[in-house]
Image: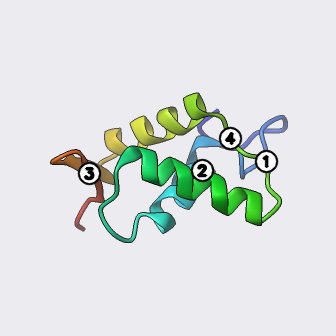
C-alpha cells in the first residue's frame, strides 16, 4: 500500500502518488485545487485516476513524514 508491490504498481502506491503530489505543489494550494490538479494531470497522461480516499491517505502520509504542512487552509511543501 505505501510502497509498490506485486499487486500495486508504483503509480498507485502512496509513495508514488505522494511524489506526484509534491511535484504539483509548487505553490500553496487548497486541498480541493490540488485534487483537481492531480486528476487533470492523470487524465492528460492517460494514467489511472486515484480515488479521493487514496488521495487523502497520500496527504496523511506526506503530513506524517513532514513533507507537507497545512497553513491557513493551504497545503504547502515543508521547508528543508
| Mark closer to the observer (2, 3) | 3
Residue drawn 54% across and 39% down? 55
Percent position (x, y) of residue 40? 65, 58
Q: Are marks 4 and 1 in contact (CB under 8 Å)?
A: yes
**Residue 68: % across, % down:** 31, 52
For the residues labelled 1 and 3, the Cα–Cα distance comes to 26 Å
Q: Position of residue 46 (x, y in %)?
A: 83, 60
Q: Secondary structure at mark 2?
A: helix
Which circle marks residue 50 in the picture? 4
Q: Quadrant of the C terminus?
A: bottom left
Whether tag 1 and tag 3 are in contact, CB under 8 A, the answer is no
Scheme by which the image is coloured: rainbow
Taking the view exactly as shown, the residue that stands out farthest to the left is 72
Element marked by disc 4: loop
Say if mark 3 contacts mark 4, CB within 8 Å: no
Q: Is residue 80 left or right of residue 19?
A: left
Characterize the local packing of mark 2: few (<14), some (14-19) or many (20 or more) Cα atoms within 10 angstroms: many
Where residue 12 appears, x then y in whole percent?
71, 44
The disc label shown at residue 17, or none: 2
Please indicate whether residue 58 sits to the left or right of residue 72 in the image: right
For the residues marked 1 and 2, what is the alpha-carbon distance in whole angstroms? 11 Å
Please tell me which of labels 1 and 2 falls first in the chain.
2
Q: Which residue is mark 1?
A: 48
Question: How packed is label 4: few (under 14 Cα within 10 Å), some, or many (20 or more)?
Answer: some
| Residue 1 higher or lower than 17, as above or below | above
Q: Give the numbered dot on residue 74.
A: 3
Kindly report the distance in space between the C-alpha atoms of the residues bearing marks 4 and 1. 6 Å
In the image, which is nearer the foreground, mark 1 or mark 2? 1
Locate residue 61: give its quadrant. Answer: top left
Amino acid at each position: 500500500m505505501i510502497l509498490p508491490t506485486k499487486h500495486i504498481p508504483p503509480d498507485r502506491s502512496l509513495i508514488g502518488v505522494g511524489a506526484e503530489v509534491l511535484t504539483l505543489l509548487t505553490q500553496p494550494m487548497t486541498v480541493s485545487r490540488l485534487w483537481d490538479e492531480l486528476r487533470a494531470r492523470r487524465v492528460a497522461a492517460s494514467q489511472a485516476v486515484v480515488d479521493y480516499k487514496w488521495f487523502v491517505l497520500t496527504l496523511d502520509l506526506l503530513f506524517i513524514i513532514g513533507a507537507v504542512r497545512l497553513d491557513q487552509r493551504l497545503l504547502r511543501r515543508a521547508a528543508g
